[in-house]
Image: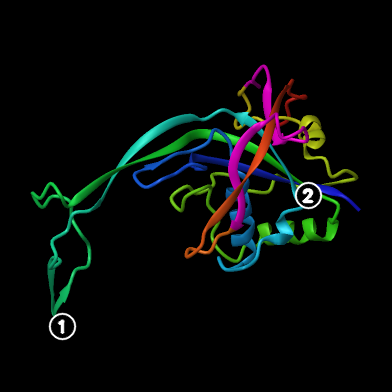
Amino acid sequence: MSGVLLLRLAAPLQSWGTQSRFLIRDTGREPSRSGVIGILCAALGMPRTAPLNHFNSLKFAVRVDREGVVIRDFHTVGGGEDDHRILRHTNGIRKYGVSIASTGRADRGILTERYYLSDARFLVGLGSEDLPFLEKLEAALREPKWPLYLGRKACIPSEPILPPGRALREGTSDPVAVLTNEPWSPRVTFEKPPESLRIVFDSTSSKDSGQPRADLPISFNRANRSYADRLVDYKFITPKEVVS
């Protein structure tokens, strides 16, 4: 049997980087496949070294229910003296262990830029012909083993990740069809729906079309973290009847 599992991703801040390198940490305009699979792994309690093969068959699509605003934040990294600050305790003296950037040394502190999506809201569809696997994911998301966050550990969900009621839609494995028919829901009762909603989905066209995204995870192992490219397409739909 087939089905589509729905995830609601909403938070004051989200970050879905697919091209982050060194000092600049980007974010996409919608959740990445690797980021969503990371949420599933955390819910299941899977270590970073675990194989990810069983997620490859999932069909992935995202509906943008509220476009977020991209904001930039600055972080300083390092900058501490070689002998760290000393903190005196009643039990003696120990090293404080936190580097500071205000050392007066221009070669110590490193300024980084990190981008976030502010006030965004998404509905993610995960389709599969393996209904028991989707039921396992749904159960894990209801009682996750580890904390769930939206791209970075500071990005805590503001709503339950699973929509109200049963989050599994049976009878089809096509997430685009389910997201097209799923009613748009307001955050507050007086919120009006947008004129159209954008759906981003895995491209089924030839390799000559579609936008490349480097967010197909091969391994989350810190020693050998790697991703492959996938192609995505998008479409716009008119929101269905608003429900509260």
How many numbered markers are drawn?
2
**Residue 160 visible, this orientation:** no
Q: Is 93 left or right of 75, judged from the image as shown?
A: left
Badge 1 or badge 2: first in the primary sequence: 1
**Disc 2: which residue:** 166
At x 15%, y 66%, the residue is 84
Viewer-side residue, 156 vs 108: 108
At x 88%, y 43%, the residue is 172
Amino acid type assigned to the residue bearing label 2 in the image:
Arg
* Residue 150: numbered disc: none
Residue 223 falls inside the magenta stretch: no
Secondary structure state at the residue bearing disc 1: loop
Amino acid type assigned to the residue bearing label 1 in the image:
Asn
Locate residue 201: give its quadrant.
top right
Locate residue 134: give its quadrant.
bottom right
Secondary structure state at the residue bearing disc 2: loop
**Mark 1 packing: few (<14 Cα in 10 Å), some, or many (20+)?**
few
**Mark 2 packing: few (<14 Cα in 10 Å), some, or many (20+)?**
few
| Residue 100 screen position, x and y as percent | 18, 55
User: Which quadrant does the C terminus fall into?
Assistant: top right
| Residue 216 screen position, x and y as percent | 63, 49
The magenta-colored residue range is 192-218
**Disc 1: which residue:** 91
At x 66%, y 61%, the residue is 52
| Residue 177 screen position, x and y as percent | 82, 34
Q: Is 224 left or right of 58, judged from the image as shown?
A: left
Q: Is 159 left or right of 104, judged from the image as shown?
A: right
Viewer-side residue, 109 vs 46: 109
